[in-house]
Amino acid sequence: MSIKAYESDTRPDWCPGCGDFGVLAAVKDALAALNIPPHNVVISSGIGCSSNFPGFIKTYGFHGLHGRPIPVAIGIKDANPNLTVLVTAGDGDEYGIGFNHMIHAARRNDDIKVIVMNNEIYGLTTGQLSPTSRLKQVTKTSPSGSIIYPLNPLAALIGDGATFVARGFSGQPKHLSMLIQEAIKHRGFALVDVLSPCVTWYDIYDEVRKLMYKLEDKGHNPTDFYAAMKAAKEEEKLPLGIFYRDETKPSFQEMLKEQIGDGRWASKSVTPLNSETLRELEYEFS
Amino acid sequence: MAQFESVQTRKSLLTGDEAVAHAVRQSNVDLVAAYPITPQTIIVERIADFAASGAFTGQFVPVESEHSAMSACIGGALAGARAFTATASQGLALMHEMLYAASGLRLPISMAIANRALNSPLNIHNDHTDVMGSIDSGWIQLFAENAEEAYDRVIQSFRIAEAVNLPVAVNLDGFTLTHSTEPVEMLSDEAVRGFVGRPPKRDSLMDEAPKSFGLMSLPDSYQFFKEDQSRATTGSGVTISQVEGEYAKLSGRDHGPLKIFGSGSKVMMVMLGSYAGTARTTARQMKNGGEQVGVISLGWLRPFPERQFLDALEGVETLMIMDRSVSYGAPAGPLASDVMSLLYRYGIKRKVIAVTYGLGGRGFLEEDAMKLFRYAEKSGPSFESFFFYGGE
């Protein structure tokens, strides 16, 4: 599949230099590499700069409410498990107002892939405190510096039973594409946290470049829970890569199929229209 | 010369959001818990700035959602604090279940709503669908026509809420008011502090005798709580008027339950919020040309100012009621339905034209107001009496 197959007519309205461009390129690259046709992909998003994502790629998309893309994605996946279902949203959406949904999706091992464009700030509303903003960070809602500890989404998700947890960087789209491909191939819930800097309100490009390293270069074993947790809690440097992967747990959708069979109408393939059925339809509705 | 105690005032150029933030800064507020959402964001940011500079002495808590914002205000008010929040659109919708908790617990909480359309489709611009979805949540609902009125009503809201033990929302139109800069004559900090005082002592979690709040009430008692609450809301108009009257003595500004222009005109346009100014300017021009048109602009919607509204109907033949929200499948929009049930209840017959307009930020200019006034003037029995108006 060519990357061109996913090109949308709508140009992103992100600021020049926004990290989200790298994420868009990586998602298209990953889908092309895995040969998933655009009509078999659904992207659910919330509210925020990054949540405009489904408009900028030619797949099915749903631009929903702030914090709620995960429940929508679960509904889609349950109704039609043949679809590749992605969630694209920001840290305000997924780590704040909608974080409870993420924990429960991870616990159920729902077969959806959550890609969070994490810029540690509310970008669309022009620079307020986010759940991943750091202690002492000065924002428009913390002018004297934040006195709230930031969330550690990776540690939280690994701890709460997520079966695939990774972190990428929008400035490394090839590496990010690899992570997204692995997430899509994984059977069950996947979180890909992407450091996607906001050039307008909180530019951390230099810092990420200075501190980042790749876990796979250090011989990290992603099936080792405690090694994953240790990497997630690392503060001096910034590890990228697959932190944790547990292939032993079946997904919710697999277990559902075991219980109820594959009787869901939405998952049934549609018979292609031939001239005979077309004539029948014309007769019926004439 | 106006008959009011001359307090020191300062004419400032402020947006509606900034005016609200200043009102909160001056009103001895103990707790602000809020979450940013366009077009309310600047209220929260300014309060955060005031807190950082020491100009606001209460606590500012940036919570993780509007549901938490309202919940924190409920907790704060239970602990005896004067609590404030601000929101808009989806934020108000997310607060929905807690709005009922605040009013059912009879907590004096104040809130500014920067009115904005609801999803779907996604739209960040102004209309009244957000507040109309919450209109029956038991909050006193006041509407401002301009930034200065928003400032005044927010200051008054604390006194009103604490006097009647009900939460109060002050509505200001998103962008039209929140983001437009207007002259606002602010009162001095001392004058406002003196006016609002400190919250009166009430049963709270801070008493020495432990108490529980919000417990289960079964069929033997629940309805009686609701009846009390309903009576308190309907009866709150007297207190609101008293507070407005006292404030008028300080400021010279008495917004009241409704503003009437062209009293007794044959056609009256009934409006909520900032677009009333456009209708009034148009009516003035038309009146100068000899046409019998006027405007009723409602400053209170809950409680509905029944008596004052009925008094305004003397000589009026046609009411054109302008709704900036839709009550899907209903006989008319929410404001029109309110007015029609009021007329019916008192056996008063007037021709009613219910118009839905201005959804999702759709503009309303003088030419639109004129077109609608002319339609109402000519309107006969065969004319459409419930329709959407979207301009050209």
Image (cartoon, coloured by chain):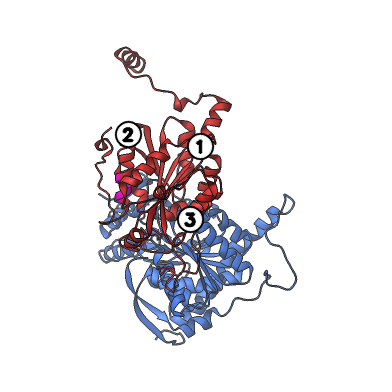
Q: Chain of mark 2?
A: A
Q: Chain of mark 1?
A: A
SS at badge 3: helix
Residue B228, quarter of the rendered image: bottom right
Q: Quarter of the image containing the N terminus of chain B?
A: bottom left
Instruction: Say which residue appears at 66% left-offset and 57% top-offset.
Output: B227
Residue A50's x, y, as percent?
Answer: 36, 51
Say which chain is red.
Answer: A
Instruction: Say which residue appears at 63% left-offset and 70% top-offset.
Output: B79
Label 2 vs 1, first from the N-terminus: 2
Say the numbered circle drawn on residue A38. Answer: 2
**Label 2 and label 3 in one chain:** yes
**Residue contact at pointers 2 and 1, CB within 8 angstroms:** no
Q: Nearer the viewer, mark 1 or mark 3?
A: 1
The residue sitting at the top extreme is A276
Q: Residues within 10 Å of mark 1 (few under 14, many from 20)?
A: few
Say the numbered circle drawn on residue A167. Answer: none
Please give the range of residues in magenta.
A21-25
Residue identified by numbered label 3: A96
Residue identified by numbered label 1: A247
Of residues B177 and B390, the one drawn nearer to the viewer in this rendering: B177
Of residues B372 and B213, the one drawn nearer to the viewer in this rendering: B213
Residue A194 higher or lower than B175, as above or below: above
Residue A132 higher or lower than A108, as above or below: below
Say which chain is blue.
Answer: B
Q: Main secondary structure of the magenta part?
A: helix
